């Protein structure tokens, strides 16, 4: 006969201000091995509350629903509540995406005793307010990228996250492309010295969903909501990915930005993901960039080039990167995300060349829990891996990567790009991260490299 099931308990180690529950500190898993998620596990619960339920909300929900069924976690995520302004729509989203409850006020969601972690999947104009309130209430926080709409907001968030860290809370930014097995393997190879001294990094992120001038004026085209256009939406990803893979920050940029369609039809009805319906009536002003093109310099002297646009006809989600070093090169294409291309320049020229690494082996990053070799993963798996890494950080008390300090670093690059573009491409320095944040980031990078070699 099997052992009787043990009751589940909350994964909390204290309480936030005002007595609200907080998932602070390393999680005590109760000493038992536990059963699989959903079968009466003895593992403690980590209650997740999510604000937002559209494109990113659905992707994050997929990650939270799946992670405990794939990875052996130190505690069990529970989809406690989801929040949105429209009561009927958010209730339908809760049913569709697997959330136990629905709220229409994010403040009520933060106040719930069954929410230990707040996942923010809203437009950028609300990131700072929600994150600061959640941290003050003693909750862990996951915030979608970019961290904020301004450097000032990002600085306040990073400072609050550092203070919360002393209370045992963690805060992480959702740069999911770090969590693809191929990019995680690339980071490990760079950290292991396979490329030697880095010389060049080039990254492009190309989409075409705004080419039609009749596409309506959604929130992504309004600066007061989105912060910036292709620069913040796509450029944030490639700036973070470049700094992550290089293992060092950008110290200066020279940039061009452009808005190709300056007026668009006002939105008629709801928008979903990257789709929306425009009316035949009045036009509104587009207040963000449609494309950003910039060069940069890393701290080591390595050079970088970046292109982010939503006007590249025929390109749907084309993120491509290449790193060139003295000993070799790496190349990656998101449209072939299970592959990493590597050139070992130390081999004899007669046989040297780029070779494909099929990143599906069980000793590649994240893949010990998935399918047999050759059975590839997809876009949605990056959110499963993101959830795994965050839950592990909460349980162990390790600062998660990318931290809010990392998010602030990206925000400073984006601001420097805008400043440079406004001054006709004048080279613009990127302010360095504060000393405390740099030390935290260094620890985090080291932890990431170790993690990548063991997952």
Image (cartoon, grey):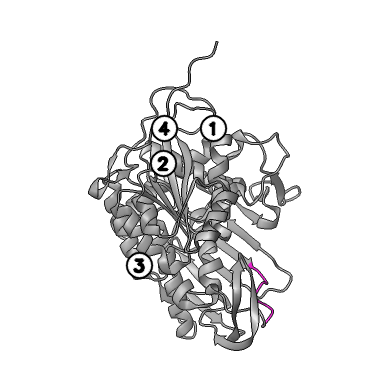
Task: Let me know if residue 194 appears in the view.
Answer: no
Q: Earlier in the sequence, mark 1 or mark 2?
A: 1
| 247 to 150, vertically: above or below | above
Residue identified by numbered label 1: 38
Please report the residue visible at 43 percent of the width from the left and 79 percent of the height from the top.
419
Q: Alpha carbon of mark 4 to alpha carbon of mark 3: how far?
A: 34 Å
Q: Which residues are magenta?
A: 206-213
Q: In the image as oriented, which residue stretches furthest toward the bottom?
A: 282
Q: Nearer the viewer, residue 222 or 401?
A: 222
**Residue 313 lies in magenta, yes or no?**
no
Residue at the top extreme, as displayed: 1
Could you tell which of marks 1 and 4 lies nearer the N-terminus?
A: 1
Q: Are marks 1 and 4 in contact (CB under 8 Å)?
A: no
Where's residue 337, x and y in %? 67, 51
Which residue shows up at 70% across the image and 34% down it? 372
Q: Which residue is mark 3?
A: 153
Relative to 170, 146 lies left or right = right
Q: CA distance from mark 3 to mark 2?
A: 24 Å
Dots 3 and 2: beta carbons under 8 Å? Answer: no
User: CA–CA distance between discs 4 and 2?
Assistant: 15 Å
Q: Which mark is residue 393?
A: 2
**Camera-side residue of 99 and 69:** 99
């Amino acid at each position: 006969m099997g052992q009787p099931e043990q009751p589940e308990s909350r994964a909390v180690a204290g309480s936030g201000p005002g007595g609200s529950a907080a998932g602070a500190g390393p999680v005590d898993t109760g000493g038992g091995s536990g059963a699989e998620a959903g079968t009466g596990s003895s593992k403690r619960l980590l209650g997740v509350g999510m604000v937002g339920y559209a494109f990113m909300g659905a992707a994050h929900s997929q990650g939270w629903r799946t992670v405990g069924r794939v990875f052996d976690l130190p505690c069990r995520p529970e989809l406690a509540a989801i929040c949105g302004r429209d009561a009927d729509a958010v209730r339908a989203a809760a049913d569709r995406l697997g959330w136990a409850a629905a709220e229409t006020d994010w403040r009520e969601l933060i106040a719930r005793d069954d929410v230990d972690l707040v996942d923010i999947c809203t437009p950028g104009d609300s990131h700072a307010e929600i994150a600061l309130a959640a941290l003050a209430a003693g909750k862990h926080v996951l915030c979608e990228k970019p961290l904020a709409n301004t450097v000032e907001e990002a600085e306040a968030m990073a400072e609050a996250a550092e203070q919360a860290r002393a209370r045992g809370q963690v805060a992480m930014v959702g740069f999911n492309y770090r969590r693809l097995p191929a990019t995680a393997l690339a980071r490990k190879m760079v950290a292991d010295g396979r490329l030697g001294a880095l010389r060049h990094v080039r990254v492009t992120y190309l989409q075409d969903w705004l080419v039609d001038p009749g596409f309506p004026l959604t929130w992504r085209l309004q600066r007061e909501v989105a912060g910036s256009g292709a620069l913040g939406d796509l450029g944030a990803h490639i700036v973070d990915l470049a700094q992550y893979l290089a293992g060092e920050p950008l110290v200066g940029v020279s940039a061009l930005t452009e808005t190709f369609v300056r007026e668009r039809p006002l939105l008629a009805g709801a928008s979903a993901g990257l789709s929306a319906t425009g009316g035949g009536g009045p036009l509104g002003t587009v207040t963000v960039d449609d494309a950003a093109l910039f060069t940069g310099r890393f701290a080591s002297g390595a050079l970088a080039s970046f292109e982010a646009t939503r006007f590249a006809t025929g390109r749907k989600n084309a993120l491509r990167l290449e790193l060139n070093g003295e000993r070799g090169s790496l190349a990656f294409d998101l449209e072939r995300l299970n592959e990493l291309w590597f050139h070992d320049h130390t081999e004899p020229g007669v046989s040297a060349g780029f070779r494909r690494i099929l990143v599906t082996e069980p000793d590649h990053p994240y893949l010990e829990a998935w399918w047999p070799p050759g059975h590839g993963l997809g876009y949605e798996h990056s959110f499963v891996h993101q959830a795994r890494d965050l839950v592990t950080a909460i349980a162990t008390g390790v600062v998660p990567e990318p931290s809010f300090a990392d998010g602030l670093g990206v925000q400073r690059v984006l601001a420097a790009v805008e400043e440079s573009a406004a001054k006709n491409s004048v080279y613009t320095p990127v302010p360095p991260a504060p000393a405390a944040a740099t030390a935290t980031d260094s620890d985090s990078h080291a932890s990431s490299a170790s993690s990548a070699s063991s997952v």
